[in-house]
Image: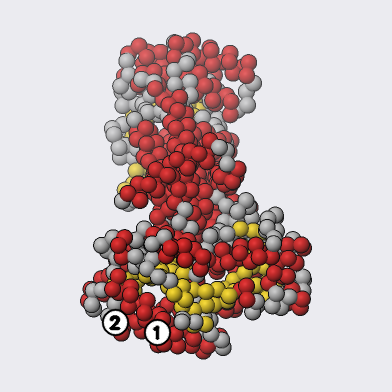
Amino acid sequence: MVIFIDYIAQGFKEAINLLISFDKEIYEIIFLSLFVSTSATIIASLIFIPLGIHLGIKDFRGKRVLSRILYTLMSTPSVVVGLLVAILLSRRGPFGYLDLMYTPKAMIIAQTLLVSPLILGLTYSLSKNRGKEIQKIGITLGASKLDIIILVTRELKIDLIVNIVTAFSRAISEVGAVMIVGGNIKNKTRVITTAISMMNSMGEYPMAIALGLVLLIISFGINSLIYSYSGED
Amino acid sequence: MKKFIALTLSLILALTLLVGCGQGNESQDLEEAEENVVEKEEESNETSGERIILATTTSTQDSGLLDYLLPVFEEKYGITVDVVAVGTGKALEMGRNGEADILLVHAKASEEEFVAEGHGLERRDVMYNDFVLVGPAEDSLALKENYPNNILGALAAISENQATFVSRGDDSGTHKKELSIWEEAGIEPAGDWYLEAGAGMGDVLKMADEMQGYTLTDRATYLNMRDVLELEIVVEGDENLFNQYGIIPVNPEKNDQINAEGAQKLFEWFLSDEAQNLIGEYGVEEFGQPLFTPNAK
Amino acid sequence: MEITISALKKYYGDKKILDIDGLSIEKGKITGLIGPNGSGKTTLLRIISGLDMDYAGTIKYDGSLLDEGIYKKMTLVTQKPYFFKRKVYENIEHPLKVRKVNKAVRKKKVEEIMYRFEIQDLRNKKGHLLSGGESQKVSLARALIFEPELLLLDEPTSNIDPVSIKIMEREILNFNRETKGTVLIVTHNIEQAERLCHKIIPLDGGKVVE
């Protein structure tokens, strides 16, 4: 127990030391984490928010089946996504010629695939529940189909941002996919979660705790931003 | 108000994801280890109830050696051995914290230090395996031709030509071994060509395969994965590549939970002729060569 | 020049909601649809406005079938209107914006209609924060701003104060007189129907009462 408390105390101390000393390695790891997960979230959002809104307000056969498929995909384990992308991108895979395996690009692809069902599913259910009403008024006031998608996006802005952040949180906190397709290579593809996982297996708890704290600080910062933003509305 | 609730819930969800995953990563291995322990404990309750925790390196586990050896011991003594396979650094750490009863690791200097500091009772040689340098079949540097059993020369050629080399980079026994050989060769590996993976042996082999690079691997893991790799052995048999395993019972004064008696039995059994012979036979059937060479004195 | 409805049938599950054949609504006039709850009045408006396209039968507008071009010429004001989470001014301006009317004209029209509905002081209030009477006036103003050819009203004045009702009725009559716009109004208030309408069509059980 004493040893345990020692670890925690040392972890905190080291975390603060690393952060205030602008340790290059740790900042590179943090920056890459943010870069990969932000890129993936933006790509997935640009494609799947409009699609989710469209599907949500559209009446078509198989809507219920689609919901079920989406909810299943939303909870796909990240290692499964990582495995899929690794198979596709590996040298002997169909996209092996692109030479993307073990690069940040591969990590972005994997995380994009990971959060896309989440973005699509959350947007879809939001739009299904609340988009109809907006679509109706759009129709009665003479909006075109594109006008309606823009209208719904704007009206549901706050909820969509919350969804985007949820997706980002999933991306930045996952370890399975980036580990498999990135490989946790120092100075190249090492991100916060893979670094933590590695530090643990090396028995370096202080550094692992330091990075864990950084992850929490990032999440706290983003969520505070949203709070203040939604407060303005 | 509804929106506020929805927002709050979403945020809680988001936070939970972060927190959950963060903690998960940190304690994953330990939790897994504990889960295994619990499972086995239930099993063993039905038999004799006695168990010991063996902290060892991933290489002994991955090579299948322990799955082959330990059942013989368990049957003979009625003691269940719970294996926690981690890096050498972590295994020694577990010993220091009294979380394991006995260690089977391969980092001689650290092990001797471990015993000298009073964490372990004594250290004895058990067996050795060897490392090999593997690389792409094309072997454009012609290492196989020029340095078939000269690892120092091969590493010098790799660093001069800046050929991709994938390092474990995880503070494992294999990683330490690799670093000691670089040191022996008088080279400080650094640069774009030298990739520190921070991953297990299997992952690193796949990475080297994928990137057409070189890596240092234990023979057993390589032989196990040979079928799915396009890598070939380029350097082997150099004395620098031998890897000595030692066994150390943890000092029972650490805490009450340490099973010193059981650990002593396993310690003696590993050094016995029976176990030594079994070690020498392991792998011959499958690979045509033993994976470990017993050398207990 | 009229709206004709022939062989219109609408079901919810097995239940027949509407069964109307050979009904015509004269353009340029105010027509009232009256009837008890569940007589199909609201459903008929939803079908004409394009919100509900799941029906059998034909509805023609000036001799042609309903399509997006025609939907753009009409609008529907409901009992509980939805407002964008923006200012009243922007809510009223919206239909002109989607019709690409230039900004100066938009401003002039919005100011004028807010004056007529006596809602200038609401201009900066957020749409979703309006009270019942306010929201009905803003909703009607938003509908009239682009001078639709056909105005569909679904009980626009239920549960609101007499002053607001008076303003709304005045503006409905003005709209019809000034632009010759057609009005189809669902109401259960017979006096209101008599005050406003040129013609009253009673509905019951989804059918026109002869």
Of A219 and B234, the residue lying toward us: B234
Report which quarter residue B234 is drawn in.
Answer: bottom right
| Label of residue B204 in the image | none
The residue under label 2 is which amino acid type?
Answer: Tyr
Which residue is drawn at the image coordinates 67% and 68% (left, top)?
Answer: B214
The mark that comes first in sequence, 2 or 1, is 2
Would you call the spot at circle 2 few (<14 residues within 10 Å), some (14-19), or many (20 or more)? few
Of A25 and C121, the residue lying toward us: A25
Q: Answer yes or no: are tags 2 and 1 on the same subunit.
A: yes
Image quadrant for the C terminus of chain A?
top left
Q: Position of residue B228 (x, y in %)?
A: 59, 75
Which residue is drawn at the image coordinates 51% and 30% (left, top)?
Answer: A141
- Of circles 2 and 1, which is in front? 1
**Distance (Cα) linking label 2 and label 1:** 14 Å
The residue under label 1 is which amino acid type?
Answer: Ser
Q: Secondary structure at mark 2?
A: helix
Subunit under mark 1: B
Q: Is residue A153 above or below residue C11?
A: above
Which residue is drawn at the image coordinates 35% and 51% (left, top)?
Answer: A3
Would you call the spot at circle 1 few (<14 residues within 10 Å), some (14-19), or many (20 or more)? some
The residue where tag 1 is placed is: B272
Q: Is residue A202 visible?
A: yes
Tag 2–tag 1 contact (CB < 8 Å): no
Q: Is residue C173 visible?
A: no
Q: Position of residue B184 (x, y in %)?
A: 66, 65
The residue where tag 2 is placed is: B77
Of C104 and B245, the residue lying toward us: B245
Q: Secondary structure at mark 1?
A: loop
Q: Is residue C85 above or below residue A102?
A: above
Which residue is drawn at the image coordinates 63% and 52% (left, top)?
Answer: A188
Q: Position of residue A70 (x, y in %)?
A: 45, 54
